[in-house]
Amino acid sequence: MSFPRACIIGHPVAHSRSPVIHRHWLAELKLEGDYVREDVAPEKIASFLAGFATSGYVGANVTVPHKEAAFRAVTRAEPVAATLKAVNTLWLEDDRLIGTNTDVYGFLAHLDESLPGWNTRTRMAAVLGAGGAARAVIHGLIERGISRLVVVNRTRTRAETLAAELGARVTPAGFAELPQRLKEIDLLVNATSLGMTGQPPLDLDLGPLKSGAAVYDIVYAPLETPLLAAARARGHPAVDGLGMLLHQAVPGFERWFGVRPKVTPALRSLVAAELGARERAQ
Ligand code: NAP
């Protein structure tokens, strides 16, 4: 008997928590199906995706470093993926590969859930980073009408390129300008890899940050990053990266397995425990 199978494509991919999320939903909803990891080396990704229709999978998530390759491989990209030029969710329609990007959805869904009405209180936001995740975050903020955005990046030219692409609402900046910017903003988002396990810490003094400003760190390993701990200690609302990871998985599951799953406290505890166990083992 055949049942739908999906996968997460990355390189490396052993660290991915996506199988835990999707298998939890399959079990909770009593659906037949499976979700596995596919480690595909960069030189093999084009041929893997070209043959996807005969792979036996109904769809896939795509993670680092293959999101841009997946965008190039699809027959049709949904508008959000075309804007980001990156695909993280694939499915088949009449054997044609279709792709979208659910990072914007995941970023916004977790922010809405954590701080309802946040956008009505946010006139200006700063985003740290100018990589793939930062692009999704910035597009989410623009979609919600945030009128002024500062993009702060180590490599300033990347921030400048993003700003040139996105228009007058976005101002590029370097880390040296950040203390001044912190006084003006209502939302700070870390979308760099700083603070992630195995990466350098994000060394940032939140002293100048505007009173009441929210801090969202999309890094989820560790779950409680030093940035979030510092924000909480100063009384700022703090939003972690795990919710984004969980919410971005929802649209793909619905497409492949036919039921829209819920992000519940039980799922969050399960994945947080897995992440904690991994941290302790390292
Ligand atoms: P990426 O495209 O490689 O971008 C990395 C960003 O971090 C760049 O802006 C880079 O600056 C900056 N950076 C790296 N090392 C740095 C350093 N030593 N000092 C200063 N800046 C540094 O990665 P990404 O895909 O955007 O992912 C970024 C983070 O977001 C990762 O931690 C990832 O796990 C997380 N993420 C979370 C979710 C979620 O669901 N919660 C989803 C996607 C990503 P330069 O341009 O100067 O190199």
Image (cartoon, rainbow, N blue to C red):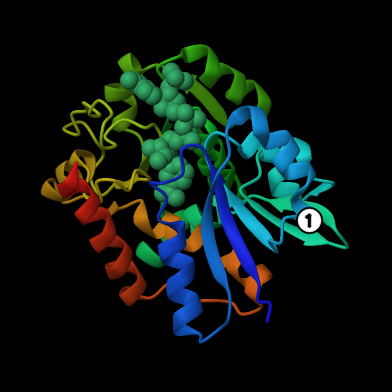
| Other residues around mark 1 within 10 Å, as few (<14) / some (14–19) / many (≥20) | few
Q: Which residue is mark 1?
A: 54
* Residue 85 in sight in this render: no
Q: For the C terminus, give its image quadrant.
A: top left
Compared to residue 241, the image places residue 152 above or below, namely: above
Spot occupied by residue 182 in the image (x, y as percentages of width and height): 30, 31
Spot occupied by residue 247 in the image (x, y as percentages of width and height): 48, 62
* Residue extending furthest toward the left: 233
Spot occupied by residue 250 in the image (x, y as percentages of width and height): 54, 66
Spot occupied by residue 66 in the image (x, y as percentages of width and height): 60, 36
Identify the residue shown where x is 24% and y is 46%.
222
Question: Which residue type does callout 1 highlight?
Answer: Thr
Q: Is residue 194 left or right of residue 261?
A: left
* Residue 4 in sight in this render: yes
Compared to residue 181, the image places residue 32 above or below, namely: below
How many numbered marks does the figure carry?
1
Q: Quadrant of ligand 1?
A: top left
Identify the residue shown where x is 53% and y is 12%.
157
Identify the residue shown where x is 21% and y is 49%.
224
Identify the residue shown where x is 15% and y is 42%.
230
Secondary structure category for the residue under label 1: helix
* Residue extending furthest toward the right: 94
* Residue extending furthest toward the front: 1
Q: For the N terminus, give its image quadrant.
A: bottom right
Disc 1 under 8 Å from ligand 1? The reply is no
Q: Is residue 56 left or right of residue 42?
A: right
In this orientation, which residue lies closer to the viewer: 112 or 31? 31
